[in-house]
Image: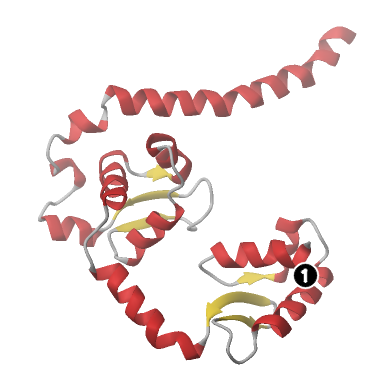
Amino acid sequence: MLTAQIESILFVANRPLSFKKLAEICGVRREEVAAAVAEMCEIYNKEGRGVRILHQGEDVQMSSSPESSKIVQDFLKDETTGELTKPSLETLTIVAYRGPITKPELEQIRGVNCSLILRNLMMRGLVEAIGEHGRPDTKYRVSMDFLRFLGVAGVEELPDYEKLRSHENVVRVLEMGQKKEEAPAEAAAAEGGAPETASA
């Protein structure tokens, strides 16, 4: 169902998305997206709902309702000022020693989805995206605030930086992930080249 697809995309997106972009992602026409968004606005934009669909021109975004602003602000303040969890510390350490690193590479090392942890670290100002956050090829690195907090001029000054950055286990995991990505492409290339070879 198109409305469910758009709902899921807006839920994980941290920025407004255009009708055109949503149409490309869902493989439908812009008019179908516009109709689906209008339907979602009727469902969400009612008193008593905790989530709203913000709609301006061709752009749309999911947001918490104004009535919930106080409790949401309190939660976010706690999320961005409290102690880091163990998974967050692990993720931050990997970004510090292996960055710039893509989200797929990070998840290859940790073995779990890191979307929410990355977002939390970015909200805290400890990690920054090089490019558009959320794209598979976007790379992440620690921020200037992170370096300032630790009192180092660069990640190279972190303890045992060269040793941990090139640790054989981490390198092995990343190489395995790269081979998995390359295998389907090589297979497809081989299949695509077969007819030409035969005709020759």
- Given the current orientation, which residue lies at the most extreme front position? 48
| Residue at the disc numbered 1 | 33
What is the quadrant of residue 7 in the picture?
A: bottom right
Instruction: Decide if residue 21 is in sight here.
Output: no
Coloring basis for residues? secondary structure
Total marks shown come to 1
Q: Residue 122: give x, y in percent of width and height.
A: 35, 61
Q: Is residue 130 above or below residue 20?
A: above
In the picture, which quadrant includes the C terminus? Answer: top right
Q: Residue 52: give x, y in percent of width and height.
A: 59, 82
Q: Of helix, strand and loop, which one carries label 1?
A: helix
In the picture, which quadrant includes the N terminus? Answer: bottom right
Q: Residue at x 39, y 83 (%)?
A: 71
- At label 1, the amino acid type is Val
Instruction: Decide if residue 102 is in sight here.
Output: yes
What is the quadrant of residue 30 in the picture?
A: bottom right
Q: Is residue 176 above or below residue 1?
A: above
- Is 52 displayed left or right of 122 in the figure? right
Q: Residue at x 39, y 42 (%)?
A: 101
Mark 1 is surrounded, within 10 Å at the Cα level, by few (under 14), some (14 to 19) or many (20 or more) other residues, namely many
- Is 64 displayed left or right of 75 in the figure? right
Q: Pick whichever, 49 or 194, lies toward us.
A: 49
Q: Residue at x 65, y 25 (%)?
A: 184
Q: Residue 89: give x, y in percent of width and height.
A: 25, 50
- Given the current orientation, which residue lies at the most extreme right position? 199
- Is 172 displayed left or right of 157 in the figure? right
Q: Residue 75: give x, y in percent of width and height.
A: 35, 75
Q: Pick whichever, 58 or 46, lies toward us.
A: 46
Q: Residue at x 38, y 50 (%)?
A: 140
Q: Pick whichever, 169 or 24, lies toward us.
A: 169
